[in-house]
Amino acid sequence: MASLFTFPNPVNEYAARTTAALVVLLAVVTAVANSGWGLAAIAAGFWLRLLFGPRISPLALLSVKVITPRLGKVKLVSGPPKRFAQGIGAAVSTGALLLFAAGAAPAAWTLLGILVIAASLEAFAGFCLGCTIFGFLQRRGVIPEDVCEACNNISLRRS
C-alpha cells in the first residue's frame, strides 16, 4: 500500500516541464471559459500528482508516456522538490476552487493567475518556484536534510 503513494526520484525535468505546460494550457482554457469544472480538474490533477506521482494524473501520463519520449530529452533532477511543488500547486488550485465555489470569482482567478505564472516559469524557463522554496526551507532546517540529500549536497546533483 505504501508503494501506491510513492513519488519518483529522480524525475525527468523535461517531463515536469511538459506537465507544467499542460497545466498552463488547461488553466488558460479554464479562465477563458470561466469554468469551475476546469478549476476542479486542475486541483484534482495536482492532488493526483502529489499523492501518486505521474501514475494516475492524466496530464502527467500524457507528458511522461507520450510527449516527453518524443522529445528524446532526459535530465534527471531530485524528486522531493518536485513533489513539494505539486503540493503548492494542490494548495493554490484547491484554494482557487473553494473561492470560486464561494462566489469569490475574482479572488479565484487571481490565485489561478499565480498558478499560471509559476507553471509558466517551470514550463518555459526551467525555473521551479516550488523547488526554490523547498531549497530555502531545507537550508533553514524546516525540511530535514535527509529528505533530499542530493538537494542539500551540490556534489550529488546530476547535470
Image: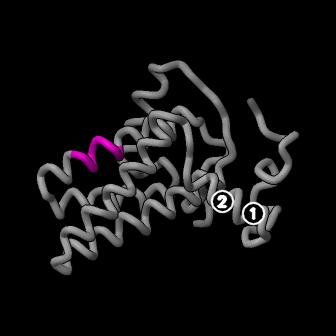
Between residue 130 and residue 8, name the one nearer to us: 130
Res 62 quadrant in image: top left
Residue at x-position 40% and y-position 29%: 66
- Pick the quarter of the image with the C terminus: top right
Residue at x-position 63% and y-position 53%: 132
Disc marking residue 138: 1
Taking the view exactly as shown, the residue that stands out farthest to the left is 33
- Can residue 61 be seen here? The reply is no
**What segment carries the magenta color?**
23-28
Mark 2 is on which residue type? Phe
Between residue 92 and residue 52, name the one nearer to us: 92
* Image side of residue 118 versus residue 138, left or right: left
Q: Residues within 10 Å of mark 2 (few under 14, many from 20)?
A: many
Give percent across and percent down for residue 52. Answer: 50, 57
Residue at x-position 45% and y-position 20%: 70
Give the SS element for disc 2. helix
Between residue 156 and residue 154, name the one nearer to us: 154
Give percent across and percent down for residue 151. Answer: 76, 50
Mark 1 is on which residue type? Gln
Q: How crowded is mark 1: few (under 14 residues within 10 Å), some or many (20 or more)?
A: some
Q: Are marks 2 and 1 in contact (CB under 8 Å)?
A: yes
- Pick the quarter of the image with the N terminus: bottom right
Residue at x-position 60% and y-position 57%: 6
Res 77 quadrant in image: top right
Give percent across and percent down for residue 124. Answer: 45, 34
Magenta span has 30?
no
Disc marking residue 134: 2
Give percent across and percent down for residue 120. Answer: 42, 42
The relative height of residue 139 versus residue 125 in the rendered view (above or below) is below
